Image (cartoon, helix red, strand yellow):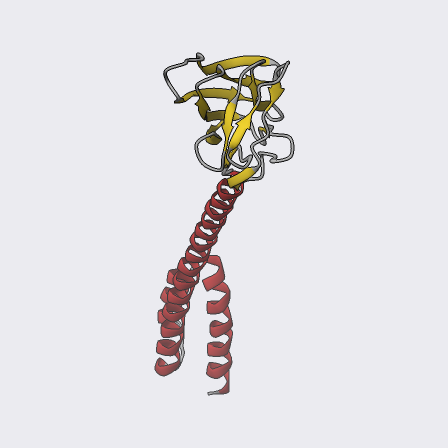
Amino acid sequence: MSWTILLCVSLFCGLISAQDDGNTTDLENHLETQGCFPDMCDLLREFGAVREKLRVVETRMEDSETQLKDTETRLTESENQILELKKEKKTVVFSAAIGGGDTAIGPFNTDITLVYRKVITNIGGAYSPYTGVFIAPVAGVYYFTIFFHAGWDHEAKLMLYKNNDVVVVTYDHASTSDTADNGGNAVFLQLVQGDQVYVRLGVNTHVWGSDYPTTFSGFLVTEM
């Protein structure tokens, strides 16, 4: 009896080794030809089957963990891209009126840069109500408008500049019969960071100083 028990224990250890080596079938066939307790042999077979199922489950779990890590990585990359896009998106919008207390501004004996002191909107802070100059914070396409109200006894002339170059002009001739006029112009400009846009009043011309009709506005259409 003792010899048989030792034999079964030896076979049990061999089964464990055979499971690792992939030789489970050969060992089971060997068990059938050797003396061993029937219950012990059945137990060994069940143990081998359970161990194989555990191995399959572990493999599937490892595959699932790998897929989960890949998914988490892709989600993190997408979130980072969204954050970068939000950071990069720039909003630039401004609108300012000339002010001046309901009186004529000009005429002067030279061209002057108009300073639109009454700020209506200045998102992004690119327009200065102290210099009258808009400085592009980013490269892109911008849209600008200028409007004026003027009296009848002097010509009105406004010139919108990009850096040192005139881009568009709006004006009205002097008249003895037309007591007041309004005018304006608009333009799309492609700017690089640091470009300056401003409005100059022509020599010997004037506009009406007020918080309402004479304005300078612009906004960023798209970055480039």
Closer to us: 36 or 183: 183
Check the image and report above or below for 82 versus 161.
below
Closer to us: 66 or 220: 220
- Taking the view exactly as shown, the residue that stands out farthest to the front is 176
Closer to us: 97 or 79: 97
Residue at the (46%, 87%) spot, across then down? 1
Residue at the (37%, 61%) spot, across then down? 25
Closer to us: 4 or 167: 167
Percent position of residue 4, x then y: 46, 82
Q: Is residue 39 left or right of residue 205?
A: left
Q: Quadrant of residue 50?
A: bottom left
Percent position of residue 203, x then y: 58, 13
Residue at the (43%, 32%) spot, across then down? 213
Q: How many marks?
A: 0
One can see residue 224 in this view: no
Check the image and report above or below for 131 versus 59.
above
